Amino acid sequence: MNKHSGHIVFVVTILLILAGTFPAAAQNNLDQLKKKRAELEKQINYTNHLISKVSSDKKNTVYSLRLLNNKIQRRQELSATLKKEVLILSDTIDNLHLDLKRLDGRLSKMKTEYARIAEFVYKHNSPYTRLAFLFAAKDINQAYQRLRYLSEVSAYIRNEASRIEELEQQKEHKVVTLNGRVTEKKQLLDQEISQLSLLEMEQQSKNKLKQNLSKRESRLRRQLTAQRRESQQLNKKIKEAIAAAIAKEKKSDYPSTPEGAKLSSSFYASKGKLPWPVKNGIVSQTFGVHAHPVIKNVKIRNNGINISTAKGTDARAIFPGTVVSVVPITNTNIAVIVQHGDYFTVYSMLGRVFVRTGDKVKAGQKLGIIHTSLQGDTELHFELWKGRQFQNPSGWLSHQ
């Protein structure tokens, strides 16, 4: 009986392990995907808010197109995330079906065995039968073994009844979980279909907007020329400010002061965790070289990232530092350059500023208000430099 009872415990334990392994891992993945889905939905809703603020009679702009492109990209990510959730739920449902099948098979065998042993105990449970069974022993040693056997059978019956009840409860729980997963999968499939429908409409809107903008190519080229002129001037001012800061230290192995070295080390240690320079916003143009969204065979270089946000939004310092330059690029584009040891952050497209050269700033401190154009677009241009080399800010900022 000991050997047999131990075998049952071993099988039940293995069953419980098999039943729990896949759902736990799947649930962890689902939780991560749900979190990502919530973030994407938040970004899409915020983009819709920004698009709604663009003047209705001036929506045919490259800015509107960039917002729409951003929304489409987020929508595609959202659709892919939903698809992954559905696949994980499908696997989870299959595993639950398999677990239930195994559980049913094990319960059937346990109940059959339990009934057989229970019948034996019932037939031999009267005092007379127990005495007869004991007196039929050849010697006192065999009688003791038979007494011990009867005791173990009774204990086994009680334990087995308890295990069967536990497995029945586990089965009931799995059935509830299975029904919940099936319902959840259906809801996700409905959402996926809805997102695909929205995506198709947004693609049509994008194509229509591109066609309208293509008719104004000469105007777009003039705008692009002006933007490049501003970008070149900003780049020149950034390099001058950095060169002046390095010259101030009077050494080429900048920074030379212990305070500067400590600040640089702390800034680097915060890579990937630095706060955003705005409270809310979306990246409307990423770092690097991009094809112009409308004009063919034209490339645009971005030394930082552009962040679209709401009217009246403040630009905020992402790390403690010192303002080394406040540069007016145009009447509606002022840039603030902040030094953090041998790192520099640049905040441009500001309409008003709240700081002056030489000011010490804290992380999160408001530097100025981002300019809102007549068309209704509010966009911060943000750059991050290490010494004389610009960096991709996306690799330094935390994920929203």
Image: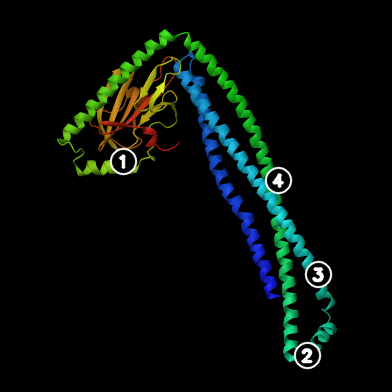
Q: Nearer the viewer, residue 336 or 198?
A: 198
Q: Position of residue 154 (x, y in %)?
A: 75, 75
Mark in front: 4 vs 2: 2
Q: Is residue 230 above or below residue 191?
A: above
Q: Which residue is mark 3?
A: 116
Q: Is 347 left, or right, of 169 in this rendering? A: left
Q: CA distance from mark 4 to mark 2?
A: 59 Å
Q: Residue at x 44, y 37 (%)?
A: 399
Q: Is 321 left, or right, of 74 in this rendering? A: left
Q: Which residue is mark 4?
A: 179
Residue type at tag 3:
Arg
* Dot 3 or dot 2, earlier in sequence: 3
Q: Which residue is mark 1?
A: 267
Which residue lies most toward the left here? Answer: 250
Q: CA distance from mark 2 to mark 1?
A: 87 Å
Q: In which image quadrant can residue 143 be found?
A: bottom right
The 10 Å Cα crowd at callout 2, few under 14, some 14 to 19, many 20 or more, is few
Q: Position of residue 347 (x, y in %)?
A: 33, 27
* Dot 3 or dot 4, earlier in sequence: 3
* Dot 4 or dot 2, earlier in sequence: 2
Q: In which image quadrant can residue 119 be found?
A: bottom right
Residue type at tag 4:
Asn
Q: Look at the image and tell me whether residue 206 can be seen.
A: yes
Mark in front: 3 vs 4: 3
Q: Secondary structure at mark 2?
A: loop
Q: Position of residue 287 (x, y in %)?
A: 38, 28
Q: Secondary structure at mark 4?
A: helix
Q: Which residue is mark 2?
A: 138
